[in-house]
Amino acid sequence: MSSNEGAREDVRKLLALFRKGLIAEDELILELEQIRSVPERDTVETTDARERVEALLGLLDGYRAAEASGAATLRKWSDVCGDAALAGGLRTIAAREAVHAELLDRRVRELGGEPRAKVPAWIADYNETITDSRATDDDRLGAIVAQFPDIEAALAPLEKTIESLESDPLTREMLRTISQDERASLEWFHSAYATRAARG
């Protein structure tokens, strides 16, 4: 039974009681006002829930686009990388980013969305500097460390989102494990940069 049908049934019962003299007019009016307020409250709650889902879809889809773009960029870098050790790490991180993009794509669709987000211009420009043929491996590593100098700060927005998803455990734990991958990737970039800098 829908909420509207349930409300109509409640009204019928109240009117029957009123006609039989079992409830007073004032009580009838009070009960009718309460019944009338329920659908309005349900509508507000439904609207709020829909807005929360739409906001989450936008966030997940934007993140999906960024991860897919990052995977493609790191894959290109690994293909032209002159350091075998560096190339090995880049391939692994590129594969992680690609898997993240696939997982986020799937979750967007499960939540009723359609993946269509594009990366913002600043990310596209940043990726171009990483794949620029004139850049050295040191230049590229330096650009990544400069973009993410503080790993905790870089992950803070994602961690905040994770903590807000109490009612969506699937998305929450998916993002939590993605965050762990991101931490490992950023730590690797910082370590690789420091190692190469120490070598001079």
Image (spheres, helix red, strand yellow):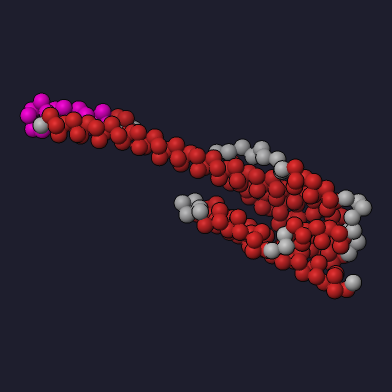
Measuring from the top left, give residue 134's x and y in whole percent: 92, 53
> Quick one: which residue is furthest to the left in this view?
21
Measuring from the top left, give residue 54's x and y in whole percent: 54, 40
Q: Quadrant of the N terminus?
A: top left
Magenta residues, dominant SS class: helix
The part of the chain drawn in magenta is 6-23
Q: Is residue 110 visible?
A: no
Q: Quadrant of the C terminus?
A: bottom right
* Picture layout, residue 80 above or below residue 52: below
What residue is shown at x 57% (from left), y 43% (from top)?
57
In the figure, is residue 79 to the left or right of 179? right
What residue is shown at x 18% (from left), y 30% (from top)?
29
* Picture layout, residue 80 above or below residue 86: above
Residue 90 lies in quadrant: bottom right
Name the residue nearer the viewer: 61 or 128.
Answer: 128
Q: Is residue 138 visible?
A: yes
Any magenta on residue 184? no
> Quick one: which residue is furthest to the top in this view?
19
Measuring from the top left, give residue 125's x and y in whole percent: 80, 46
Measuring from the top left, give residue 118's x and y in whole percent: 70, 40
